[in-house]
Image: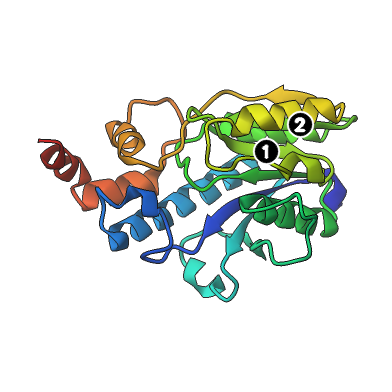
Amino acid sequence: MERRDICAMGVMAKSPRPGRAKTRLCPPLQPADAAALSAAFLRDITENIALASRSAPIHGCIAYAPAGDEHAFAGHLAEGTGLLLADGSPAMPPIVQGFGRCLLHAAQALFAAGFGAVCLVNSDSPTLPTVCLIEAARALLMPGDRIVLGPADDGGYYLLGMKQPHMHLFADIAWSTSSVAAATRERATSLGLDVVTLRAWYDVDDAASLERLIAGEDDGYAAPASYAWIERNRLRGRMSLAAQ
């Protein structure tokens, strides 16, 4: 199969190091614990993508930052997962700033590698239903230009899929706010792009969403690595005590 018939899924990820990964989870976690949980998330997300690739033509990779931290991902990813630097360092249009530079960097690099479609996936949703990944790839590999948007409960998005690296999808966006998904949808519409909207899901990026993950009541991916870490570190009990 040629790469133009494959959807690349790049997981936007910081290296799982204390002080860099999942810092918004500190507190209730300590930096070392947050980094270890981040590594478990990466294992689950990349295994989830590998599972989705059995049902749709998908290639998974980690779009990482900072440069030089490739070794930090060793042992934390599903077999066959690629690594791609996406730190926003290449020259970018001045209207693309902040996290948008990293997203555009990843999209441009994956299209340059010959893939026919690209999904940028967050590293905060270890329980994302596998069907969402499958639906995104299938929609993007159909004829016609479009984007696929996976809205997050906090107003951001857990997945943005495209068939071209549309720079304007990343320009003048107020990143890390509750308006990101809506602004992206409006931008796509202004470009004349159809928008395929997936099921909403949640990010694990604060104490409340961590408690939701620990409760384990959602019908998503089983996330075995994340739940094994939670059990091994008795996180349910620790969170309960912290809440008292």
Q: Is residue 5 left or right of residue 208?
A: right
Q: Secondary structure at mark 1?
A: strand
What is the three-letter code of the residue carrying label 1?
A: Leu
Is 54 in front, or is 85?
85
Quarter the C terminus occupies: top left
**Residue 63 percent across, percent down from the top left:** 63, 58
Pointer 2: residues within 10 angstroms few (<14), some, or many (20+)? some
The number of discs equals 2
Q: Which mark is residue 160?
A: 1
Q: Which residue is farthest right?
A: 144
Circle 2 or circle 1, nearest the eye: 2
Give the image quarter of residue 57: top right
Residue at image location 63% in from the left, 35% down from the top: 133
Alpha carbon separation for disc pair 2 and 1: 13 Å
Above or below 216: residue 8: below
Q: Is residue 19 left or right of residue 163?
A: left
Asked whether the beta carbons under mark 2 and mark 1 sit within 8 Å of each other, the answer is no
Q: Tell which of 64 and 99 is nearer to you.
A: 99
Question: Mark number for residue 187?
Answer: 2
Q: How crowded is the residue under tag 1: few (<14 C-alpha within 10 Å), some, or many (20+)?
A: many
Check disc 2 and give the amino acid type. Arg
Tell me where residue 138 appears, x and y as whole percent: 75, 32
Q: Give the mark, 2 or 1, whose residue is nearer the N terminus.
A: 1
